[in-house]
Amino acid sequence: MKDKVKARSVPFSQTRSRHASETAEDYVEAVMELIEEKGECRVLDLARYFNVSHVTVSRIVKRLHDEKLLISSPYKPVRLTDAGAKLAKRAKERHAIVLDFLIALGVDKANAEIDSEGIEHYVGSKTLTAMKRFLKSQK
Amino acid sequence: MKDKVKARSVPFSQTRSRHASETAEDYVEAVMELIEEKGECRVLDLARYFNVSHVTVSRIVKRLHDEKLLISSPYKPVRLTDAGAKLAKRAKERHAIVLDFLIALGVDKANAEIDSEGIEHYVGSKTLTAMKRFLKSQK
DNA sequence: CATCATCCGTAGCCATTGCTACATTTGTTT
DNA sequence: AAACAAATGTAGCAATGGCTACGGATGATG
């Protein structure tokens, strides 16, 4: 009774780093949206956006600044680096596709918005392609 | 220029607790699978399954024991409580539906397996229903 | 029944993401 | 210019999930 347990291919291997990059994507995406919506993005805007305290935001902003995705100087609005903007653009596109896909599948807009936030981080390129194909076939 | 930033409806509000329940679901699901596959589930089986150290597993098992999802006594195999089995069953069903759905959508099995692991935690009841509907319509 | 490999627990470290409480900076408003 | 409100920063705590290193428990094997 000593069967080897088959290890998970990939998904569970790096939960920590995956969560970290999730955060990075969520934040650059939010920064881009907030700048588009109101011209600038402050720490408190992000805090309200994510429903967390400004302390949590400023710590994460600092980390993403170190990772050269954001530009932040004390008491000034947050901006995106080129790399950050590129990541944000990709994340937003993927997000939009997942959202449109769920709606096309028949999910109401409110639930599609909620679920797409979480799902977008786990949609690989093959799945994304399949979603795009489905969207095209529906037109 | 003082627009209120619209807060996210729900999704981002409790990242921490969401990640915690993700872990709970992953673990009870794994425990159920391992017991089905090889009769019992040891800490090291879970460690190999998730590609983490046995230390990480035993800490999480302890927490899930406190939450009354698992039963564990020192140096003994891990079992499920009724509540844990119920949660595992629901998680497995949802997982299976998401997996079948992705495959029906045209994603290859390997990628469908990877993506479904992450996606399953963010599929609300409305989205799940839509996936089931799609699967039925494909038969 | 002694030994040894395997399994598991504990100690203690780090990173991430929450928080409250308090300090500081900025900018507006007398 | 002073005073005040709002925005940020800093200190320090907790929970979660990673890890290595070490030691104790279990069970198989000689």
Image (tube, coloured by chain):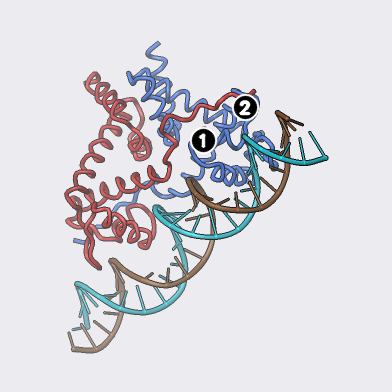
Chain colours: A blue, B red, C brown, D cyan
- Mark 1 against mark 2, which lies toward the viewer? 2
Nearer to the camera, B4 or A12: B4
Pinpoint residue B61: horizontal percent, then vertical percent: 30, 57
Pinpoint residue A105: horizontal percent, then vertical percent: 34, 20
Q: Is residue D17 above or below residue A61?
A: below
Q: What residue type is labelled 1?
A: Asp
Pinpoint residue A73: horizontal percent, then vertical percent: 70, 41
Residue sitting at x 60%, y 37%:
A43
Q: Give the letter of the chain under mark 2.
A: A
Q: Mark 1 points at which residue?
A: A26
- Give left or right: position of A114 versus D11: left
Q: In this view, does B38 lie above or below B13?
A: below
The residue furthest top is: A139
| Occupied quadrant, residue A90 | top right
Q: Give the letter of the chain under mark 1.
A: A
Q: Which amino acid does label 2 sit on?
A: Ile
Nearer to the camera, B87 or A45: A45
Question: Going from the N terminus, do you reach mark 1 or mark 2 first?
Answer: 1
- Label 1 – label 2 distance at C-alpha: 14 Å
Q: Mark 2 points at which residue?
A: A35
Nearer to the camera, A26 or A125: A26
Q: In this view, does D9 lie above or below B60?
A: above
Residue sitting at x 19%, y 57%:
B40
Give the class, few, some or many, for how many residues have Cα within 10 Å of label 1's Cα (few <14, many ≥20).
many
Pinpoint residue A65: horizontal percent, then vertical percent: 64, 43
- Give left or right: position of B80 versus A85: left
| Occupied quadrant, residue B132 | top left
Circles 1 and 2, Cβ within 8 Å, touching? The answer is no
Name the quarter where the C terminus of chain B is drawn.
top left
The kind of secondary structure element at disc 1 is helix
Q: Which numbered marker is on residue A117?
A: none
Name the quarter where the N terminus of chain B is drawn.
top right
